[in-house]
Amino acid sequence: MISTSNITLRVGKKALFEDVNIKFTEGNCYGLIGANGAGKSTFLRILSGQLEPSKGEVIITPGERLSFLQQDHFKYDEYPVLDTVMMGNARLYEIMKEKEAIYAKEDFSDEDGIKASELEGEFASMNGWEAESDAASLLNGLGIDTEFHYEIMKNLDGPKKVKVLLAQALFGNPDILLLDEPTNHLDLDAIAWLEEFLINFDNTVIVVSHDRYFLNKVCTQIADIDYGKIKLYAGNYDFWYESSQLLIRQMKEANKKKEEKIKELQEFISRFSANASKSKQATSRKRALEKIQLDDIQPSSRKYPYIDFRPNRTIGNDVLTVEGLSKTIDGEKVLDNISFTLNHDDKVAFVGSNELAKTTLFQILTGAMEPDEGFYKWGITTSQSYFPLDFGEEFNNDYTIVEWLTQYSEEKDATYVRGFLGRMLFGGDDGVKRVSVLSGGEKVRCMLSKMMISGSNVLILDEPTNHLDMESITALNNGMTKFPGVLLFSCRDHQIVQTTANRIMEIVPGGKLIDKITTYDEYLESDEMARKRATYTIAKEEDD
């Protein structure tokens, strides 16, 4: 069990947390939620001991081991992948290295033998003989193939490093597990594996995530941070949302009844206070009036942008034809003879673990990259707007936000442009901020403003939820669902894929395409999906 006693953290004169007393118990998975800037990651750092609070203490049951997801992706660059995972249990890894050092001695003494025996006993009691296979199992579950297990960490790309660090946090059955955005950079298959792992995990989990579907699947409790306080709700994210909204409605209804009662008492007092025969009743009502207290309904610190993609032109039946597209990158064939035709009402989700293939296809379809073979043709009624996976170059300039967005607008009036920025929570003086200093989430909101102002009837989005808070993801989900044009998108948010897509395309390893007109959940459950996965697994085993 892990709990806090009067935790307070001050940043300057501002209190980020004030006298937080909360208890996290064994067997529960707690989703830690709150608006951007509420202090979710900061609170996890306090719990893990990485950050000292201004006041108060964190209490952990003696003997329990705490593990957390490392955020420094370069910390273990000089270590092998398997070793990095096993470092998740620091004491076990220490014993392994001590044993190696003792057995490597040329002048092995009696004292060394006694020490080695003690270490072997402790090693066995910690299931040390299964450590390497357990670490490998975690890596395989997260999609890190065996060929990478003995690589040095610095040789892995960013997404693989994230998976290794996640496996490190999960390793060795920790008593308390702290996870800050564990689904970031995970493909949907890896997220599904992690969901099952946490559902079957018997100890205490505290997780920060912007993935609503993930929180609904794994959480038994929600810890909501708002205005420096943390309040616990039983149930998953959807249950928290309904409960919190119900509580506010009940308080508003109770206040309304109290206000009606106040008005009634005030009218009686005003009418009869000067009447001798009614004076006692008027005095009694004054006392009753003084006892009525309206509930203090503090508005949430959460702010929801308004995302509304409105095409300037209705799309025709001729949308997109793709014939025989192939592309090889760094010796890997990421697209192999890809062909498909889009219809005017298609909303296509590109899923699967091959992120490079999805991004490559989007870059080809938007003219940013040439295919090795094949061609594509957009219909004459179409207009495309593209949200790239890497949009950093868009902001390498000295424009203000208003100037930046104006360059993409046919209407150059500043008031018109500011209207789109206002929908995305850029108000007042925000318009004169330089785009080069914006945060990741602010840049994403700028990119979505650009897509809205374009009036395009085809939207291509490559992982648009990266850097967004839950409120912005919800707004994006609503905007994509309502959009009357054609969508092509990749997204790690299960709920967006399930509620938006009516067609699923997966580019499997080797570059081939699976194309199904179905919802995402139905696709995952389909027999073809099961056969495809089985075939791919067998093929890999034969190759190995």
Image: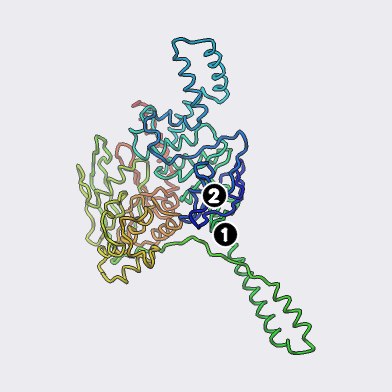
Residue 41 on image: x %, y %: 48, 48
Residue at 46% of width from left, 34% of height from top? Answer: 168
Q: Quadrant of residue 106?
A: top left
Disc 1 marks a residue whose amino acid type is Ser
Which residue has dot 1 on it? 244
Q: Is residue 152 left or right of residue 95?
A: left
Residue 327 on image: x %, y %: 23, 41
Q: Which mark is residue 49?
A: none
Q: Could you tell me which quadrant the N terminus lies in?
A: top right
Residue 393 vs 424, above or below: the answer is above
Q: Could you tell me which quadrant the C terminus lies in?
A: top left
Residue 253 on image: x %, y %: 62, 70
Disc 2 marks a residue whose amino acid type is Ser
What is the secondary structure assignment of the residue under circle 2? loop
Q: Residues within 10 Å of mark 1 (few under 14, many from 20)?
A: some
Residue 439 on image: x %, y %: 37, 54
Q: Is residue 487 left or right of residue 135?
A: left
Residue at 54% of width from left, 37% of height from top? Answer: 66
What is the secondary structure assignment of the residue under circle 1? helix
Given residues 237 and 272, the one toward you in this image is 272
Sequence-earlier tag: 1 or 2: 2
Residue 108 vs 279, above or below: the answer is above
Q: Mark 1 or mark 2: which is in front?
A: 2
Residue at 31% of width from left, 59% of height from top? Answer: 434
Q: Residue furthest front?
A: 12
Q: Residues within 10 Å of mark 2 (few under 14, many from 20)?
A: some
Total tally of numbered discs in the picture: 2
Which residue has dot 2 on it? 54
